[in-house]
Image (cartoon, rainbow, N blue to C red):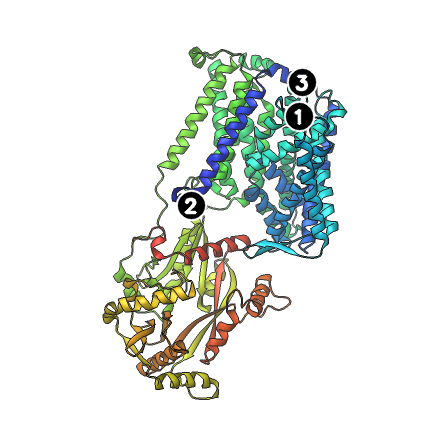
Amino acid sequence: MHNMPDWIRGHRAYVTAAVVAVVVAIGLGALHHLTRQIRLADVSAAFDAIGRGQVAMALLLTAISYAALTLYDVLALRIVGRPLPWRTAALASFTSYTLSHNLGLSLLTGGSARYRIYTAAGLDGPDVARVVAIAGATFWMGVLTVTGFALLGHAGPLAIDSKVLPIWVPPLAGGFVVVLAIGFVALCAQGPRRIGWRGWSVPLPTAGQAIAQIAVATIDLAAASAALFVLIPGADPSLLPAFVLGYALAIIVALVSHVPGGIGVFEAVAIATIPVDRTTLFAALIAYRVIYYLFPLALGVIALGWHEARRRLSSQMIVGARRVAEGIAPSLLGAACFGGGAVLLLSGSLPSVPGRLRDLASVMPLPFIEASHLAASLVGTGLLLIAPGLYRRLDGAFLMARTLLLAGAAFSLFKGIDYEEAIVCLTIAGLLQLTKPAFYRRTSLVGRPLSAAWLVSIAAVIGTAIWVGFFSYKHVDYEQSLWWQFAVGDDASRFLRSSLGIAVALAAAALWWLFLPAPVRASAAVEPEEIDTILATATRTDAMLALTGDKRFLVSADGDAFVMYQVHGNSWIAMADPVGAKAAWPDLLWQLRSMADAAQGQLLLYQISADVLEIAIEMGLSIIKYGEEALVDLTGFTVEGSGKRSLRQTHARLTRNGVTFAVIPATEVPALIPELAIVSSAWLGAKAHREKGFSLGRFDPAYMAQFDCAVVRVDGQIVAFANVWRTDDLGELSLDLMRHDDHAPSGVMDYLFVELMLWGRAQGYRRFALGLAPLSGIAGRRMAPAWAKIAALLFRHGERLYGFRGLRTYKEKFAPLWAPRYIAGPDGLALVKALRNLNRLISRTGRDLPGIPS
């Protein structure tokens, strides 16, 4: 990964999307090759041959499969030690899998649905992530185990699209997979243990739980594959073992390809590997898509709408249930809107029902029918593009989607009396109306480009629709005259014109996003003099972080206060309290919150004091205690007394040994930069650290020259230094960078602190800020929230990760007062993501940040 070119690393999501889009094209190309001898009329006849009994059996097996899927979550919840009632796990599992089966964006859709439901039930973000991981592992264990046993039991050679594999390949591969499954159960039988990566871990199941996982996944896969098998007219039961193997391979390839819903890829592999007549299998696959994928999705969406309707009619509904319903509505209805667009596109690619079209032509002019056909395809394209906006809860997307759905229903009727498509559109529009409160975010619909995952999904659906059109009209000789032929039965011409309209609509959308203004800078350019003027009124020294060069600023209307912040990812991170007049703080923070919301971002306030808590609570942010800051009262500071014996002895020893201290004025610091740079480099090398930013300064000549510098010398040579922060009102004195080299005597930093405090007392400063002790002062009692318990545990036992306890113990030597500091931000996983962005922000130097001039 380190050798990856920068342009790929910077656009990894879109590069991945492009690769997946290529896979979709390859899958559709393979499907075209495999179906080159199949005609639409034959497929239609095979589809009509599927009896009601077969459909009923497929529906029953689908229900069994989805019931088994709910047990994935039940087992995962027990493994992580957070069991919940089956109905809660079933709701989470059903909504999650109906979304991920159809869109394929399991982390974006299925994961978010689980998160909404489980957090409402009391789980925290890490536990939800563990449930998702274990449920996914359960599915893969079942697929691989079934595949392994099917390969072992496969009699004779294995053929893939008429190409026969060596006879020894299936049993060898099958045996390897089965041995892995048995080994996993044996590993689990050895006792409790955890596996993880970079500090995040999941517990391994017991042997019994591991066997249960494999059994449940096997039932799921068996029922799912049987639901397809019973749809094949005249299928011989003796083919069932080979069929299960082909089905399992198709599932594996579809999942590995990351193609949304496995569109094209699943069908291509199934046709290539399952030894059944391809025409009947193709018809069965179409029915299977409807029964196993689209029907459960429709049930989930309808159930959600019914739940919302009951909520509005009943005043006795539980608040938690309402929150869950509103939480998952954007995901489900975004998927439903996407599915509605796909239905309209596929309808436009298939021939119209001749009888309906003749009846329509008898009462409606042909140009109107032609225009309706084109308009319906354009509406379908628009719904694909709008669906991500519903997922992001945009009110503009809600209004546009509702309008398009109503238009799509009308155009479906006017283009061929396609009342089925009209019912689908009207149903989704009605459900949107019922869940209107869930789409509350007032922001620009097109202000943010589509994500890579949504682009792949859109490309997959449109590519499939075009492939379906060419498949349907493969008997037509494509000539230039087709483009302008207009006749009631001329479906091929309508398909070509619709495809052109779709291409034009996509090109227009692409150009629109391409020529959108660059992401809006969070604030207008601020003159340094304006910042300096406000800094002169600062009462806390951490305001000097404004001078590190890696911040953006939002200044009050009166120019008497500012808040410093930076944007990373979708996180808008404000550093410390606002600086300047307190009366301006609420307006500044609310304005920053509005700017973040308008940009689809999340606001995080980092290292704020109690003075900001009331504002943060009013803004609806979650409050977490980050630690405590040590503040030394300088008015009575002395090294005398039994509590400061070690400080007094260290100070006396170094003084006797000729160590000297001095505060160098800022005007003289540039001349010392070469000598200070040697000390700084030695310190960084010894600690194996690199320069950081945002929440602390870095060794940069321009930055260092803005402050006085405290230096410690031995024999005239600088062995330690710290740049000095101070407020103009003499209220607070502090320091930022503290570095020493290998020649510094033991205890040199104690000596520097004592001398600087004595100097500050002589200058009239009232207190000295010794800095934060992270996680300090958090009790972590039995009834405390999970974050407090984790923080307290880390503080007590996390010395190997970071010297939490040792840092507080060191600062206690100076007998400070402890002031709490907080983090305020969004709830749940959004807070985890914001803290991750904060960590990345701190780990990068100011010149690496976007929007900061070098």
* First in residue order: circle 2 vs circle 1: 2
* First in residue order: circle 2 vs circle 3: 2
Q: Nearer the viewer, residue 585 or 64?
A: 64
Amino acid at circle 1: Ile
Q: Secondary structure at mark 2?
A: loop
How much space separates mark 2 and mark 1, taking CA atoms?
41 Å
- Which residue is disc 3 drawn over? 46
Q: Locate residue 164 relative to residue 587 in the image: left or right.
A: right
Q: Locate residue 547 relative to residue 336 in the image: left or right.
A: left
Q: Nearer the viewer, residue 680 or 65?
A: 680
Q: Local crowd at mark 1 within 10 Å, few (<14), some, or many (≥20)?
A: many
The location of residue 187, given as percent across then percent down, is: 69, 51
- Which residue is disc 1 drawn over? 274
The location of residue 108, given as percent across then percent down, is: 54, 43
Residue 432 visible? The answer is: no
Dividing the picture into quadrants, the one containing residue 160 is: top right
Residue located farthest toward the bottom when viewing the structure as drawn: 641
- Which residue is disc 2 drawn over? 3
Label annotation for residue 833: none
How much space separates mark 2 and mark 3, taking CA atoms?
53 Å
Amino acid at circle 3: Ala
Q: Local crowd at mark 2 within 10 Å, few (<14), some, or many (≥20)?
A: few
Q: Going 51% across and 62% down the picture, which residue do you hit?
A: 623
| Labelled pair 2, 1 in contact (Cβ < 8 Å) | no
Q: Going 48% across and 43% down the picture, which residue do you hit?
A: 394
* First in residue order: circle 1 vs circle 3: 3
Front disc: 1 or 3: 1
